[in-house]
Image (cartoon, rainbow, N blue to C red):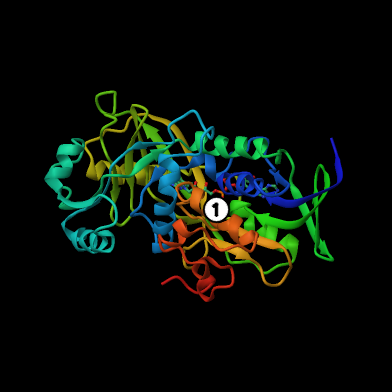
Amino acid sequence: MRFTGEHVDYVVIGAGIAGASVAAELAANGSVLLIERENQPGYHTTGRSAALFSQVYGPDQIRALSRASSRFYQNPPPGFTEHQLVHRRPVALMGRSDQADTVHAEFEQVRGRGDVSLITGNQLREMMPLLREGYAACALLENDSADIEVHALHQGYLRQLRERGGQLRTTSEVLGLSNANGCWSIETNQGRSYASTVINTAGAWADEIAGLAGTSRVGLVPKRRTALIVDAPEGHADNQWPMVVDIDEQFYLKPDAGKLLLSPADETPSPPCDAQPEEIDIAICIDRVQQAFDLDVRHIGNRWAGLRSFVADGVPVVGYADDVPGFFWLAGQGGYGIQTAPAMARVAAALIKDDQIPDDIAEEGVEIARLSPLRRTLTSEVT
Ligand SMILES: Cc1cc2nc3c(=O)[nH]c(=O)nc-3n(C[C@H](O)[C@H](O)[C@H](O)COP(=O)(O)OP(=O)(O)OC[C@H]3O[C@@H](n4cnc5c(N)ncnc54)[C@H](O)[C@@H]3O)c2cc1C
């Protein structure tokens, strides 16, 4: 089927969590077309996450966006989903004795924000009996973190988009973008559409979309991260166990539907692609996890990899480009794009409409200058 000539207010490119959530927000006040190359929205990074909601993870703007998203997770709008979006899952950022200073420094940064405490290695071992005796010296425990039902969240936004009159078009790849007199022409393998505003939510491909539009790239670097599912020692992982993350992010482990989800927390730069796990990363993962936990990995169930995309300062890119009219960025969500999506979509929708960002989000410390594609730290070297 070919589409020709339709004109909408907003074309959103990429139907992962970023595109679905901002498209749903925008559809409350305008006509929206959400375009996705794959036949399944969520096929790429959105469908490959560890599904964590943590308010102590990531740089300060991420933490602010996560805090601002927490009310949505606890109380989604009526009719958004029939599922509970979050289930409590404490997270322990753990350190050996040589990492104890880092744990303490991290704790000082988040003290008083949410339900966080410092615990000893022995206390952590009482919560997570697989931990080897004497391995951990201490941990920063976040008690009010959670597992996110990512599929329910994503589908909730797509349903909200449809209910508000917006359209999702899958198997539709954006191949060209041109602007004449303030009107965008969006060429896809299924035909052409027109829009006043284009929103770039193409994940790892966001810089490529910028290239098509003739606007400056932001220096996005997709980084591959691997995950695998293994059996727990007694055949069943206790769902009460916390997620345990090495404080220097060398590995993490969390219960997942009776099994264990492991990751080496790898960050290997990659071109945008359908990322696949590498044997070496799986081997590194098992080695690191087995040093910390009493776990004999004999069989790997599922394994996958996904791309977490970052700019140099690690903060998402949200705002209009200044060198072409009506081109809006919502990219660079790194490893936090699910947990921050509810607030990020509301911030983006407000800025797209030239409104102030909502007060409840500003009050959490979200600053639009820090998210702007025009900020100076965007492409500076990471220190
Ligand atoms: C192993 C792993 C663990 C993670 N854990 C967490 C976590 O615990 N918590 C958390 O919050 N985040 C986590 N993340 C990060 C999170 O998954 C991402 O930040 C988020 O999914 C990014 O969403 P997105 O919509 O920007 O990208 P994507 O989901 O990749 O969506 C972009 C879409 O754009 C489409 N597209 C690209 N080019 C075109 C084109 N030319 N035409 C049409 N469509 C196009 C793609 O097909 C794709 O579907 C994790 C990621 C990984 C890989």
Q: Quadrant of the N terminus?
A: top right
Residue neighbourhood size for the residue with mark 1, other residues' Cα within 10 Å, grouped as few (<14), some (14–19), many (≥20): many
Q: Amino acid at mark 1?
A: Arg
Residue 223 visible to the viewer: no
Q: Determine whether, in the image, residue 33 is placed left or right of residue 80.
A: right
Query: Can you give x and y, in whole percent of width and height, for residue 104 in the image?
Result: 20, 61
Q: Determine whether, in the image, residue 322 is placed left or right of residue 48.
A: right
Query: Can you give x and y, in whole percent of width and height, for residue 187 in the image?
Result: 81, 51
| Vertical position of residue 12 compared to residue 297: above or below | below
Q: Determine whether, in the image, residue 315 is placed left or right of residue 94.
A: right
Query: Can you identify the residue that label 1 sits on?
Result: 346
Query: Can you give x and y, in whole percent of width and height, for residue 184 in the image?
Result: 79, 58
Residue 209 or residue 270, whichever sits in front:
209
Count of numbered labels shown in the rendering: 1
Residue 36 or residue 287, whichever sits in front:
36
Extreme-bottom residue of the structure: 376
| Vertical position of residue 189 compared to residue 57: above or below | above
| Vertical position of residue 44 compared to residue 256: above or below | below
Q: Residue at x 26, y 29 (%)?
A: 238
Residue 277 visible to the viewer: yes
Extreme-top residue of the structure: 235
Q: Residue at x 49, y 28 (%)?
A: 82
Query: Can you give x and y, in whole percent of width and height, for residue 64 in the image?
Result: 41, 58
